[in-house]
Image: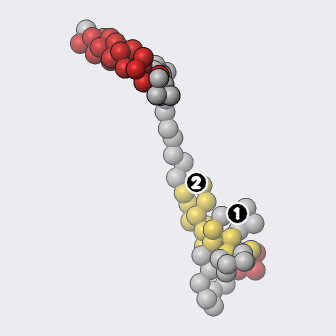
Amino acid sequence: MRASRLVVTLAAGALVWATPLSGQGYRVRLDARYQGVSYRGVMLDSIPIGAAVLSGDGSYFTSDGFAANCPQAAEYCTYYRSG
């Protein structure tokens, strides 16, 4: 009961503020749908230094476009990819 009263109060407040704000170019839109976010994480991976692509500023990338870390005198470059 208390949650429905809060929703009605918020909706009424949005309607009261929507009219004066419309003259300034602002719009208020209420969205009642459930929205979620997921995160797959990242995994450390490596490629041989010969497979890394050197960019114009001296940084390395994988062929897929991930930024790679290639230490001097190392045989492999490390990078993080989506898990």
Label 1: element kind:
loop
Q: Tell me residue 50's x, y (percent).
A: 76, 80
Q: Tell me residue 8's x, y (percent).
A: 32, 11
Label 2: element kind:
loop
In this view, 53 is above or below 21 = below
Please give the name of the residue rendered at 63% of the width and 72% of the height, measured from the top-left corner. 68
Q: Nearer the viewer, residue 29 or 21?
A: 21
In this view, 3 is above or below 74 = above
Instruction: Identify residue type, mark 2.
Output: Gly
Asked if labels 2 and 1 touch by Cβ distance under 8 angstroms, the answer is no
- In this view of the protein, can residue 3 be seen by the observer? no
Q: Quadrant of residue 21?
A: top left
- Residue 19 shown left or right of residue 75 in the figure: left
Please give the name of the residue rendered at 75% of the width and 66% of the height, measured from the top-left corner. 63
Return the residue at label 1: 65
Please give the name of the residue rendered at 73% of the width and 61% of the height, measured from the top-left corner. 64
Q: Quadrant of residue 62?
A: bottom right
Q: Tell me residue 19's x, y (percent).
A: 42, 17
Q: Nearer the viewer, residue 71 or 16?
A: 16
Q: Residues within 10 Å of mark 2 (few under 14, many from 20)?
A: few
**Image quadrant in which the C terminus is located:** bottom right
- Residue 17 shown left or right of residue 30 in the figure: left
- In this view of the protein, can residue 56 be seen by the observer? yes
